[in-house]
Structures are given as structure tokens and as C-alpha cells.
Amino acid sequence: MGAEIKSETINYEGKTALLVSVKNGEAAIGTCCAGYTGMGGAGALTKIFFIGSEPVVTFACPNHGNKQSNKLISLAPAFKGYEQKLYAAITSSFNKLVGGEPLLNSLREIFSLLQDGVYAVYISDYYPTDGNGVFFWGGYNIPHEVHGTAEYNRLIGPRMFKPCFLVPSQPLDYFTMKAKVAADESVKRREIQGIAYHLAGFHSVLLKGHHGAVACVDNDVPFRCAVIEKICEPYMEAFVPVPPPPARAAEPAENGEAGGEGAAQTEAPAPAPAPVPVFTQEGVTGFRSPSIKLPIETFPKEMMRLILEGRPEYKPRQFSMIAAKLGNGRKKTVSNNVLPYSVLEKSDHMPDCEMVESAYAISELSDQQLNCLLAGDVECNGEVIVSPNFYSSIVTACNYLQFKDAKRFVDFTIAIMDNPELAATHEYVSHRALSQGSNKKLHKFFTDALASGEAKYEKILPAAQTFVDRFKAKT
């Protein structure tokens, strides 16, 4: 029986979402739990992202799969490549996508390979790094904790966000300079550069477009991907009902009525407004993925049934074959050093996970709020600006400005580093400022700080020297 694929475009709160349901899919692409294998410690659940019968990415979920914990991620040691049939299906979908065909038609072959469920499909920009300044392709050779891979991000909370960092689905052994040279020209003509499947938190697995990612970074071309996210996470929300209109005050009685002629007339005091109740919904409000949150009533009935009756993930028929390969080792491990140095250098200057978290955690920062932070106050006009913790507020505000507004970021960081009372934040902020390596205002500040010899600049001196040296090398 072939896969049954249906799609629906949902309009909700002024936004449009493309939903795709897969029933009787081949389950050749997806994630499953392998139990407690010892990876990441005794209390860590091991999960696998697989393609066909090959384990591609392993990720350990500490604290018995706690969704607030970051994952330990690495390429599966045994992975060397997957079946030609699956590679051809992914390549065919990618060729249709870059050829200009609609998103649904282009990815139909990939949809048939997915596990049963409902998926959100959209186009989004990605940074081809691991979220910490390391180019993604050779950044997962050994298991290590990857910041930003928790399902529930403590800083963002229940807000929606778009994943924007990558995990490879191919070992770096596949990289060739010849393919990269060919990609240098093709990426300039494409609107979409890759296909990604959401893995965890801010991170997605890149199914197609590895050489294109190298070429995009090297040629300063945005890396835009078609993204597939499974919708399976329930959520609950409190809501405030609309208060009733205030009651009209009683009109004073006319002469000769109830009070008698000439009687003193007094107005009844206006009733105190009743407090507006806040109701907590009993049960689930709806289902979500990282980038989309939809109430139950907005889902088509068949998709809602598929979500309720299905499972977020399940072991495919070929699980025994996948599990048997987990213990195998790779003969050789290739690092990112085989890539052009320009790519590695530009990756280090791309937005990292802390910046993106701050951008989603804060809706806006006014100049007045920044001035309050610089004065050592975490509140502005009676409201907490970012966090009751001052150090956390400075760090988050700094990351937000670096991601959103480079000019205000430079002014803010200089004001912090010039204030000896904020010395606890100097080291962190000075390293953040290294990303603005060509900024003349920062160069002058760091040059003056090095020449002054003042004690208040003690913690920023190493970063200042690095900044000045880099600036001199560029000019």
C-alpha cells in the first residue's frame, strides 16, 4: 500500500501554514528511541535519526529524556551513506525544488519516506553552523553537548521560534573541492539551497545541500532551506475573557418622585469593577512544532485524528538493523580543516545560539530600557526589562542587539566596558564585540583602552589586543 499524502493550507491569526499529513509512510526517514545505551551517561536516553536502515545521527537526552536539557549529538560512528534509492528520491525532490516547482509537489517523494504524522512545511533561512561558530559539516565527529537543542528553551519559554542551525546527514568524507567549485556558481542562481528535517530545538538535519552550504558561506549567499517539522507536541494556554461593559450609573430622581419635592438628591456610588477572571483551559489547547502553534479547532478532522491516534515517534520495521550498527566504528574521521579557511572564519562570525535565543526572548529594547540597564537597574517604569538577574539581563540585551541592531550594539558594549561598576560583565561583552571586527568606533575604543593602562580595562585587555590585531591585518 502506498503512502497517503494530504495537504492543507491553514490561515490563523493572519499567518498561513502549509500542513502535510502522511499515512502509511515508509518510515525511512525519522527519529526513534534506542533506550539506555550508555551514551551520555547512565540516565541518558539515546535517540537516533535514521535514513533507511542506517543510523545517521545519534543524540543522547540527559536526565531520562528531560526536554529542558540540551542533547549530546554526534554523527553515528557506523554511518557511511544510505541506500541509492533513498538518495535518488531526496535528490529528485531537491532538483524539483530549485527548478521552481511548488513546495508540496517538489517534496512529495520525501513525504512518502517519512513516519506517519502531520508536518509543517515552510521556507526559512539557516546559518550553516552548529550554533556555536563551528561550521556544521565536520562539527559533530564526537558526542558533545550542543547548546540550543532542548525542546523547551528556558529563555524563550512557550514562544514560537524557527530552527536555524544544522546537523549534517553526510560525513565530511564526501566533501570534494570539485563539487564545491561547481556549487559556487549554482548557489548564485538558486532561491532555495537545501532541504532540512527538524531534529531538536534550534537544530535541523540537512538532508540535501552540503556542498551548497559551503559555497553559500564562502560567497556570502543566504542559505535558505525547505524545512519539514513534525507537529506532535500538545500545549495548554490560559486565556482572559472580554470583560462585560460597565453598568450605567442610576439617574437622579426628578422632583416630586420617590424622594419627595425638595428632597436632597444624592447619586448612588458607582459599583467597584469586578476583577477580570483568568481561566485555565481544561485539557489541551492545541498542538505545535517549534515554528507553529495551532488550536485544535483549526486542524482538519483527518489530520487531528492522525495526531491523536498516532505517536510522536516510533521504531521502524528496520530498527533491529539500525540498532545493530550503533556499535560499529568509523575507520577515519575528517575534520573541518579540509574546508577552505575563509568558510571556517566566516562561520565563526555568524550569529550563534545565544544571540538567536535572545532575539526570540525579547520583543523590543528601547533606549530608555538600555539606559536603565547601564545605570544598574533591571526595571524600567515599574516593569522588569529582561530578567530580575542583572548579569543575565546585560548578557541577553547584548546578544539581542548584536543580532538585531549592530549600531546600538556597539554603543551599548562601549558604554558597558567603560563603566568600572559593570566589571563583572566586561569579559563576556568584550568577546562579543570581536564579531564587529571592522568597526572603527570599537577599534578606537580598544586602542585607547590598551594605551591608557587604567585598571578598569583590565578584563577587556586580551579581547582588545585581539580586536586591534585583526583590524590591522584587514587594513
Image (cartoon, rainbow, N blue to C red):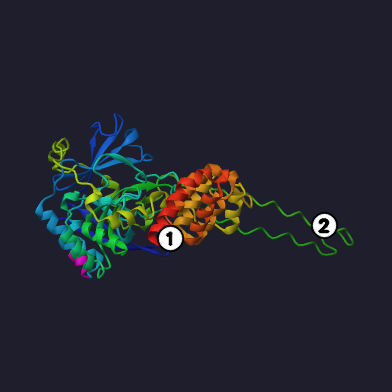
Q: Which residue lies most toward the left here?
A: 84
Sequence-first tag of 1 and 2: 2
Which residue is depicted at the point 27% across and 53% down?
Answer: 118
Secondary-structure class at tag 1: loop
User: Which residue type carries mark 1?
Assistant: Ser
Image coordinates of residue 322 in percent, x first then y, are 15, 41
On the question of residue 237 being in view, the answer is no
Q: Residues within 10 Å of mark 1 (few under 14, many from 20)?
A: some
Which residue is depicted at the point 42% across and 47% down?
Answer: 236
Horizontal relation, residue 397 to residue 189: left or right: right
Of the two numbered discs 1 and 2 in the rendering, the one whose residue sits closer to the viewer:
1
Image coordinates of residue 330 in percent, x first then y, are 15, 40
On residue 266, the disc is 2
Give the quarter of the image for residue 105.
bottom left
- Tell me where the magenta segment starts and ends, as one range: 95-99
For this rendering, which residue is in front, 168 or 427? 427
Q: Main secondary structure of the magenta part?
A: helix
For this rendering, which residue is in front, 405 or 45? 405
Image coordinates of residue 290 in percent, x first then y, are 36, 52
Q: Which residue is mark 1?
A: 438
- Numbered disc total: 2
Q: CA distance from mark 1 to mark 2?
A: 74 Å
User: Which residue type carries mark 2?
Assistant: Thr
